[in-house]
Image (cartoon, grey):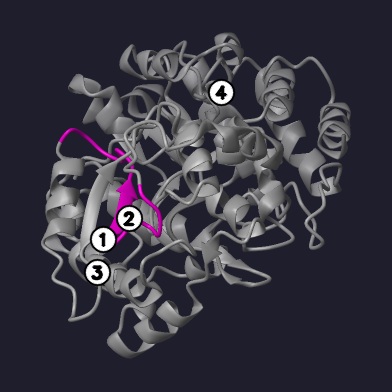
Amino acid sequence: MSQRASKATLSRRGFLTAAGGAAAVSALTACGGAGGGGNGGSGGGGDSLKFWNMPWGGTEFNPSDKEITEAYEPADGLPPAVYQEIQWANFTQTFSSAVASNTGPAVSSGGGTQAFLFESQGKIAYADNLLESWKENGLYDDFLPGLIDTMKVEGGYAAIPYNLDMRVMWYNTTLLEQAGAELPTDWPSYLAAAEKLKAIDVYAFGVGAGSGSFTGSHIMTSFMINNGGGLFNADHEPDCVTDRNIEAMEFVLEMVAKGYVDPGSVTYTSDNVQTQWKDRRFGMGWDGAGLASNVGGDVAAELAVNSPLTGPNGDQGALHFPNNIMMYTNTPSQEGSEAFLTYYYQNMASLWTEHTGIGLPPLKSIADTPEFQSDANAVKIIDEWQPISKTWAAPGSEALFLGVTDVDGTPAMSTFTQTVLSGAATAEEALTTLQQALEG
């Protein structure tokens, strides 16, 4: 199965960052109707229920998705659904202006954190009743472990998990064999494999922290989580300067000092990172589930997903991003919104089984299909990485919240990552600067 990771990483998740938070939404209210192709009209589309979805996969994704939507036959008295593709370009303005002016969708996907912005404004219809009804038809128990809990806020469930964006460890099987390196299982064995790769002039920590590439900051956070740390405490406050986080960043700095990290990583874009994999300059590294597909060519067949590492204190963990679908209070029928989503989740499996590139599925029944099981890397990610992965909210919470947008694709995180990857500060200094930026 081909898992195509979008290069619009911020577009998928960093809604608040791009929009500039609630103040930007207020400023956008005067923009009128939704740009970027949104339909006009109020009440979620007049007599129709508007479903807005993003181009999550390849060129075949949205036509297939539209076909599923238009095949929906509502019960008597409930509205039919109409489909609208919303482009990632300017999507923040599209949603912000449409929701503010009540011309937006009744149901949509979008940036992975936008539900938490609109929930704070009273624009989201909580999914509690819908999820309760799914306990009767089996859908609730079909979700992968812990996913539903990531959507829980104080008022209720702000959204429903839809597709997963994971950060996992990849390695080049040919290069590790050439180097005589064993697959790492923990941090010391990672260093041992890195030393052997260095002997054949290959880097062992393939990431990018340049313009538009946020993989580096994701992996910095993943190593904190892998050591039982993270960026937030249980009160949803930034809590960066902890012993576990310092230990994790000291590990990365050790790799920098020993020459295991490509010096160019500080400025590498996603394209640069993929070029290094293609040129066999990266023997190990961290990326999304679609790395092999994105790299392509002969090298794709050499790339494999490693099992999760065990941190020095016995922890396992990584960062993941549960993209979601949300319902809005502006709908021609809340009952209709819930009925449509029940139909949609019961009939969306073809988006994965027909390899449209949407990403990893949220449902066990889709992951168990022969079509999905044919991709060993995707199966390994679902079986081994998804159960141990956490959101930006770790370690204080499993559930996302409004404040996580302060670290998702923000300048503060980019500066922090570049500082670490360049070895320009100690771990405690870099984390202290990050803490001060987040508090500010």
Q: CA distance from mark 4 to mark 1?
A: 61 Å
User: Residue placed at 74% from the left, 46% from the top?
Assistant: 231
Is residue 39 found left or right of 155 in the rendered image?
left
Q: Disc 3, disc 2: CB below 8 Å?
A: yes
Q: Which residue is mark 1?
A: 48
Q: Residue lying at the far bottom in this picture: please name it.
A: 136
Instruction: Please state which amino acid type lies under the numbered disc 2.
Output: Gly
Q: Position of residue 226 (x, y in %)?
A: 63, 50
Q: Is residue 360 visible?
A: no
Instruction: Please state which amino acid type lies under the numbered disc 1.
Output: Ser
Q: Nearer the viewer, residue 96 or 313?
A: 96
Dominant secondary structure, magenta: loop
Q: CA distance from mark 3 to mark 2?
A: 10 Å
Q: Disc 1, disc 2: CB below 8 Å?
A: yes
Instruction: Please state which amino acid type lies under the numbered disc 4.
Output: Glu
Q: Which residue is mark 4?
A: 195
Q: Which residue is mark 2?
A: 45
